[in-house]
Image (cartoon, rainbow, N blue to C red):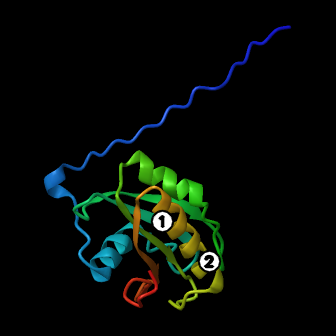
Amino acid sequence: MNTDYRVAEVGLTYRNRVPKKDRKQILDSHSAYNILRENFSDDTIDYRETFKVLYMNQGCQVLGCSTISEGGITNTLADVRMILQGALLTNATAMVLAHNHPSGSTRPSRQDDELTRKVVDAARLLDIKVADHIILTSEDFYSYNDEGRI
């Protein structure tokens, strides 16, 4: 009997080309919003829902921003495993979840609440803190942390 088991080799890479001294730091929800706003395209923030994550080190310095998914006008699917994969690749100890609402409303939906809970629970198993989940528009934002929901 032939027992030749071949599997694909997985290669994972993370390159941070920003010197440590130039990394932006997240001090509060306003600084997180400002950094996130720079990473959302003016062309699509009011048009298409996009889910992004800011990964941070112990000093709340941003290690990177990753686009997890892009969707349509009313939703986008964010995979918890993809979010945590980015955290592990960057050696992040904390992260800020973020997505926009093209409608202009910053009010979280039931699906937003469920996803936030799932990511917080999964990240806790890996000792990674979800510092915030920000829902943003081109002009305003909602912070789960500011509202005491994280």
**Amino acid type of the residue tagged 1 in the rendering:** Lys
Q: What is the residue that sits farthest to the top in this orientation? A: 1
User: Which residue is more in the foreground, 74 or 134?
Assistant: 134
User: Which residue is more in the foreground, 119 or 52?
Assistant: 119
Residue 109's mark? none
User: Which residue is more in the foreground, 66 or 139?
Assistant: 66
User: Which residue is more in the foreground, 22 or 133?
Assistant: 133
Specify the quadrant of the image occupied by residue 56.
Answer: bottom left
Q: Give the spatial CA distance, label 1 vs label 2.
A: 17 Å
Q: Secondary structure at mark 2?
A: helix
**Amino acid type of the residue tagged 2 in the rendering:** Glu
User: Which residue matches tag 1?
Assistant: 52
92 relative to 126 in the view: left or right? left
Identify whether 126 is placed above or below 134.
Answer: above
Q: Secondary structure at mark 1?
A: strand
Q: What is the residue that sits farthest to the left in this orientation? A: 21
Residue at (55, 82) in percent of width and height: 101
Q: Position of residue 67 (x, y in %)?
A: 49, 60
- Quarter of the image where the N terminus is located: top right
Residue at (55, 54) in percent of width and height: 82
Disc 1 or disc 2, which is closer to the eye?
A: 2
User: Which residue matches tag 2?
Assistant: 114
Residue at (46, 52) in percent of width and height: 86
88 relative to 16 in the view: left or right? right
